[in-house]
Amino acid sequence: MDLHKKGVFSMPVSDIEDPPPQFEGHVDIEEFWQSVDQEIVCRGFLQSNRENPCKVSPSYVKWAPWIGPLTRASKKVLNTEYAKLTAKKSVVEQADIDISEERLSSELMNLKVDALRKLVKECGVDSKGSKMDLLLRLREEMKTRSTYDKVFQKVWGASGGWAVIMCPCGIVNSVKFNIRAESPRDYADMLLSFKHFPNVVIYDFARGLVTHTNFREPERLPFSPFEGRVAAATPENIASAKRGELKINLSWLQIKKDPPDLNGHPATGSAEHYALYDTFHQYNTKDEKDALRLIGLVPELCGWVNSQIVEQLFSGMRKNNYFMNSLSPASHIFLMRNILHHHNEKVNQQALEDLKRVSHGDVTLDAHGKATLVHVNIPKDVDMADHCGEQCEALTMTSNLMPCRASWTLGVHHPLQEQLVNYVLDEDRPMNELIVKDGQTCLTRENFVSLGLRREMDSMVGNACFRLIKEIFQHQGKDVYIVDLHIPPTWLLPSSCDPFLCLPLDPQKKDALIFPLWTPGHFLLCYSWYAVLEAPFDFTVHDMPCLRRWWCTMLVENLEIEGHGRRFAHFTEQGIQMARGSLDPIFRIPRKRKYDEVTMEPVPLKPCKVKEPCRVESSPEGIGILQLPEEVLHKIFILVVLQDGDPAILTLALTCTHFWKIVREESFLKEAHFCWLDSVVNWNSFSEEYKRTYRIPYLISRCIQCDDLYKDCEGYWGSGQRGKLQGFYSENDFAGYCCMNCFYVAGGTI
């Protein structure tokens, strides 16, 4: 759930009449939207909308959200925006204002100083001082509703934007066009109007939503158990969640609860309701109990749900803001509802096409509008392995893989397949066990673990994935050239190889050239797959755990061990035997010996004296790194520091005395700093005087406040990592302090 604050319409708030005392917030949704339709139709018969007898104006009594007929409980829905006008505020309503102030403050930070100073003057506040002074004064003044509304209209527009509730697949379930500033009250109105209260809601102020909703419904407490947290707020659970060790399984998100709970959701069978934070705001809260509202605590959600789906919708709506915001209120909501309707139709149609493309079966809709795959019922006492065959193999064949979420999520929970992938990624088993040996591709468990778990992906397994991607392209009629993952690093120092040497002879004839570059984190294998086939990106960084495991599955189900078949494909005879423990692991494939069948008789020639080759005695240990010359180590360590940043200097210094003597030298520190500067600044674009001013070495100083050592440098700031710049400061405003916080703690002012 989120607010599209840029989607507003012009509206004189002062003209809206207060509702009658007996009004409780119930609005007839069908009657309201029918009146909007009548205004649009009637407009076609009139020269000016001012004369329209069916004109609809914003009103607290007759202004309804849009909720689909199968989603809402009845035609009477809630809109309690009139309650925002009450002078005496409860604890919940005060929380509403507080969160809105936080959002407004974050938006005010983005204003330029001149615009902010003008706004401060309009609010009757002293406009002198720095930007921070203005923000602090304005924030204090915003505690009064009149000033708050004035600031809101300046920053966010006339009306309060429109609040949206969406499901993770991209469908808009409901939309509420706010008259006043957004608060958790708006989302509570829609949720309490639903026929079935969602099991999990994701919102940027989850705590405020729970407090407000449970305050309005104290008898049934919509968000429970644990006040919408995934676990009880005990000190042990909070500490475990902060360390990332707490995992709470909500298995009914994947398999319906049997038997279902009383008043359980028809899709999940569960009556539990949780409110979690989206990933952008999960660390903004000050309440330590909110550590139990993170998506990452639930394995069934982590890596699957896209918590930014609403933000992506708003991003696509930006092109409409210019003309939509100039319309009358009725025209604005009429057109916006139509746009969202066509958006839903497009998403549904695309999802059905994707499912049919990869399922090879019939897709139907159940009574709740949910897509289901028609399949053969298999008795529970029958071994699943007996029913695996061509239909299972088709799901993972490269000819059937498409760049869409349905392709890499459908059928990924086959029990036999899960068992084999778990075996491959088992860190307690030998790392040198052979998993794949197919032509040039040779992968062990060690390679797979780097891909399937949260680690830096090995280049060997990366090349194997790109091999499958190339096959996918070929089936789609694309001729693509992919550079080996081991080659791009040779373009950097000290090798500095020519990148053009790796290109094919006819690069201009290729549909695409892919250069896999290594970045901290992981390779985006899916990015090249989606980009070449021009598919819309429907995955985020939170999908990576799922995608990593999916790529492991694709490798073992498409590639074999020579002479032993596809041992880890769940639909093969070898895979079934492997799952049953009937086969022993393989650690080595014997090489095929080549015997020369042709023998050559020596021809007697003039005798000559053969010079015996020189023999080099090799030590059992070989040549160690400590035997390298210091000049070579110096160059290697420079590359290490550029790759990992300044912390690598400490790591190298603690390794051994020999390394410590090298990295402590002033010449080493100076060279590493200059190499980093040259990677973030194009000095050719500046004058020599500028270069002499800012291309200077740094000093190691001690902070006046915290007594810590810090990197003291004027101009360009960074961690010393190649290509990464943290900022540029022409003047050192915090001289003598390691950071801004220490400066202010010590009582400093700017």
Image (tube, rainbow, N blue to C red):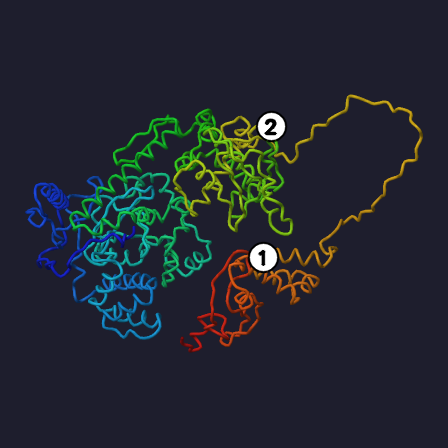
Q: Amino acid at mark 2?
A: His
- Quarter in which the C terminus is drawn: bottom left
Q: Quadrant of residue 676?
A: bottom right
89 lies left or right of 614: left
Total numbered labels: 2
Residue 581 versus residue 679 in the image, above or below: above
Q: Earlier in the sequence, mark 1 or mark 2?
A: 2
- Which residue lies at the image location 66% right of the left edge and 57% below the top edge? 635
Between 743 and 78, the one lying in front of the other is 743
Q: Position of residue 32 (x, y in %)?
A: 13, 46
Check disc 1 and report its element: helix, strand or loop. helix
How many residues crowd mark 1 within 10 Å: few (<14), some (14–19), many (20+)?
Answer: many
Compare residues 443 and 41 and report the one nearer the observer: 41
Q: Amino acid at mark 1?
A: Leu
Q: Can you give x and y, in whole percent of width and height, for residue 52 in the image?
A: 7, 47
Residue pointed to by mark 2: 564
Q: Position of residue 519 (x, y in %)?
A: 52, 49
Check the image and name the residue furthest to the right.
607
**Residue 706 image point, x, y percent:** 50, 74
Relative height, residue 216 to residue 270 (above, below): below
Tell me, for residue 219, which label it has, or none. none
- Which residue is labeled 1 in the image? 642
Give the class, few, some or many, for how many residues have Cα within 10 Å of label 2's Cα (few <14, many ≥20).
few
| Identity of the residue drawn at 17% across and 67% down | 88
Are the residues flagged by discs 1 and 2 in contact, CB closer than 8 Å? Answer: no
Judge from the rendering whether residue 501 lies leftward or rightward of residue 295; answer left or right.
Answer: right
Quarter assignment of residue 409: top left
- Image quadrant where residue 380 sits: top left
Tag nearer the camera, 1 or 2 = 1
